[in-house]
């Protein structure tokens, strides 16, 4: 396609989509008079327009009014700052025709989404100025609050600071649990800016700001300064995204009211956990339920970041107290939502099954590049290690510095195992995660297993100044140890063959066929061994496969003699074989 044709497509699409105004207001303007009397102003919380499963995203410089009656130059998508909110159901396919109308390179990274390498927005796959790329993938993972943002080489921090980020919400009707929905399900993207720069989003970090990160002293929520939201005396679901470059928030309500933590980065926890505060570092998400029914009409409560101490020395520091958003209670309508006693169980990895431990030491040196992982700085063309698919690994992250490092991984969701050896973790650590805050001088261990895609992914600090400075490594997910592809012809049907030899001692081979399902290029498959009591004995495969014939070996040397069942599960197809271990 010629460039002129592309531009034409953008223009036409702009006309067809008739995008809503860049900034949409949630609260009705009429009530402002009353609210001003009660609480004294602010700006109603804004919500970006919705983006459905397919369409055009055009990245360009735009002028929007972040502060009333003042123009701010931002980097917007389809004229919207923050970018449009992707809301997509698990199992559906996203198609984004992305146009880079900036005069520098750009990529879109779908933070927390498990997607093929070519869709991950790695800086090596940058989209050149005035060029386009189609991002398309099927959302295979759990429902949850994710987000997307720039990942361009050395430009990520600037792009995000200037507005290139948006929500990515995955829904799943099977995970409804009668939670508050619609207007009572509110995404909040928290970012800090500088009062002295109003109305501009200036981004020019000095050397010290590359050390500690680019911090501000005022918070925008969904791009709204001094945000407030009119609420009802009922239960709400808030999806908090820390979209800041470097700031860590200590989240709490101004009256110290308790809330329920219901989700971490990768979706719902196994059960709600009550808390009065939590730490949220850049790249992390958390969902909470908050009940306004104990407030009376015309009362307000503010979500804040509490003060904490930190070693930074700059005028803009971590740990300063900040207001985030004010909630003004205005009516009695019920959301109909409730706080469930529990959600679906989470299968926590068993650290006894770890096959490999990797150690990452985070350090800061006095010469640029300052931030290092195992004394390395990012090299786009270097692969720093290889991890086989399906192997459970323990990653020990040692923070040898006095600063925070929110460490993030692509291509997988992981589980936090311990902090300084302590496995008794705060609620925000327990569940599926992709970013973990490693506090000054702390050691954090995570358990990680790549089930889905092979290819090159990133491990980096989500303090975006640290990331752009090179605190990032490439790794490659390789063939799983133990599964072999026997043929890549497309078999006629799903089939699990009888294992051989059978009876066996101690190892046996299991073959299975994966056929293609209409319009799906990858099929998710699980091959599980159960003992006679129905207890899971081994996971032989858990991930996605392209159609073909496969063989897996099960070495049962540590299992007692007896009857075992091996079950293949792919979508609605399941088949079970009986195997006899005779020692
Ligand atoms: Cu949200 Cu590689 O980042
Ligand atoms: Cu990411
Ligand atoms: Cu860092």
Image (tube, helix red, strand yellow):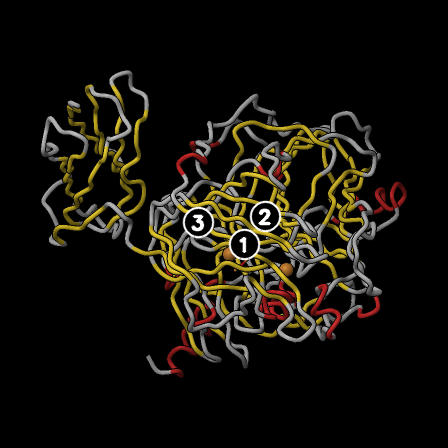
387 left or right, relative to 188:
left
Label 2 sits on a secondary structure element that is: strand
Q: Is residue 136 visible?
A: no
- Image quadrant holding the C terminus, namely top left
Q: Can you tell which quarter of the image residue 568 is in?
A: top left
Q: Quadrant of ligand 3?
A: bottom right
Query: Where is residue 319 shown, x and y percent of the image?
Result: 79, 52
Q: Nearer the viewer, residue 345 or 446?
A: 446
Image location (x, y in percent) of residue 65: 72, 66
Q: Please name the residue shown 13% across and 37% down the image.
A: 495
Task: Give the distance between the C-alpha atoms of the residues marked 2 and 3, in whole angstroms.
Answer: 13 Å
Image marks 2 and 1: residues in contact by CB distance under 8 Å: yes
Between discs 2 and 1, the one toward the N terminus: 1
- Report if the beta carbon of the residue with label 1 is closer than 8 angstroms to ligand 1: yes
**Residue nearest the viewer, comparing 133 with 232:** 133
Q: Nearer the viewer, residue 214 or 49?
A: 214
Residue for badge 2: 436
Q: Quadrant of the N terminus?
A: bottom left
| 130 sits to left or right of 572 | right
Q: CA distance from mark 3 to mark 1?
A: 10 Å
Query: Which residue bears the numbered disc 3?
Result: 412
What secondary structure is found at the residue carrying circle 1?
strand
Of callouts 2 and 3, the N-terminal one: 3
Query: Does residue 420 appear in this view?
Result: yes
Pointer 1 local density, CA inside 10 Å: few below 14, some 14–19, many at least 20: many
Q: Secondary structure at mark 3?
A: loop
Q: Is residue 331 above or below residue 92?
A: above
Q: Where does label 1 land, which residue? A: 408
Residue at the spot 52% in from the left edge and 29% down from the top edge: 270
């Amino acid at each position: 396609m010629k460039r002129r044709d592309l531009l034409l497509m953008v223009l036409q699409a702009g006309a067809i989509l008739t995008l809503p105004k860049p900034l949409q207001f949630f609260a009705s303007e009429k009530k402002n008079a009353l609210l001003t009397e009660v609480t004294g102003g602010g700006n109603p919380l804004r919500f970006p327009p919705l983006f459905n499963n397919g369409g055009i995203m055009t990245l360009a410089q735009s002028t929007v009014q972040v502060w009333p009656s003042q123009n701010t130059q931002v980097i917007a998508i389809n004229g919207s700052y923050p970018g449009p909110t992707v809301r997509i159901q698990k199992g559906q396919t996203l198609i984004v025709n992305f146009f880079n109308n900036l005069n520098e390179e750009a990529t879109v990274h779908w933070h927390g989404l498990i997607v093929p390498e070519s869709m991950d927005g790695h800086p090596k796959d940058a989209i050149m100025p005035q060029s386009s790329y189609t991002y398309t993938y099927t959302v295979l993972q759990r429902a949850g609050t994710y987000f997307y943002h720039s990942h361009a080489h050395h430009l990520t921090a600037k792009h995000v600071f200037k507005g290139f980020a948006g929500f990515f919400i995955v829904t799943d009707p099977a995970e409804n649990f009668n939670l508050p929905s619609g207007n009572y399900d509110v995404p909040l993207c928290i970012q800090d800016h500088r009062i002295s720069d109003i109305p501009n989003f200036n981004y020019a970090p000095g050397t010290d700001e590359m050390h500690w990160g680019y911090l501000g002293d005022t918070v925008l929520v969904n791009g709204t300064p001094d945000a407030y939201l009119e609420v009802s005396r009922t239960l709400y679901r808030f999806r908090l995204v820390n979209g800041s470059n470097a700031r860590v928030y200590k989240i709490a309500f101004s009256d110290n009211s308790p809330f329920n933590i219901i989700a971490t980065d990768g979706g719902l926890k196994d059960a709600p956990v009550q808390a009065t505060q939590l730490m949220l570092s850049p790249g992390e998400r958390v969902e909470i339920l908050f009940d306004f029914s104990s407030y009376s009409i015309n009362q307000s409560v503010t979500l804040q970041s509490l003060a904490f101490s930190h070693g930074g020395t700059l005028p803009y520091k971590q740990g300063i107290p900040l207001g985030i958003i004010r909630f003004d209670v205005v009516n009695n309508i019920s959301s109909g939502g409730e706080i469930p006693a529990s959600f679906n169980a989470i299968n926590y990895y068993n650290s006894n099954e770890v096959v490999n431990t990797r150690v990452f030491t985070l350090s800061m040196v006095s010469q640029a590049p300052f931030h290092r992982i195992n004394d390395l700085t990012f090299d786009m063309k270097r692969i720093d290690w290889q991890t086989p698919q399906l192997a459970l690994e323990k990653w020990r992250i040692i923070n040898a510095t006095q600063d925070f490092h929110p460490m993030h991984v692509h291509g997988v969701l992981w589980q936090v195992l311990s902090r300084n050896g302590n496995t008794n973790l705060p609620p925000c650590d327990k569940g599926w995660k992709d970013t973990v805050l490693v506090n000054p001088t702390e050691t954090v261990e995570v358990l990680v297993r790549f089930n889905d895609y092979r290819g090159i992914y990133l491990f980096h600090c989500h303090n975006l100044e640290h990331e752009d400075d090179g605190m990032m490594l490439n790794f490659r997910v390789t063939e799983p140890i133990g599964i072999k592809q026997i043929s890549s012809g497309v078999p006629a049907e799903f089939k699990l063959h009888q294992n051989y030899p059978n009876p066996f001692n101690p190892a046996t081979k299991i073959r299975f066929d994966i056929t293609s399902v209409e319009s799906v290029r990858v099929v998710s498959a699980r091959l599980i061994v159960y003992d006679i009591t129905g207890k899971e004995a081994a996971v032989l495969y858990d991930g996605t496969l392209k159609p073909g014939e496969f063989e897996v070996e099960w070495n049962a040397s540590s299992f007692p003699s007896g009857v075992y069942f091996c079950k293949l599960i792919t979508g609605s197809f399941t088949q079970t074989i009986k195997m006899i271990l005779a020692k």
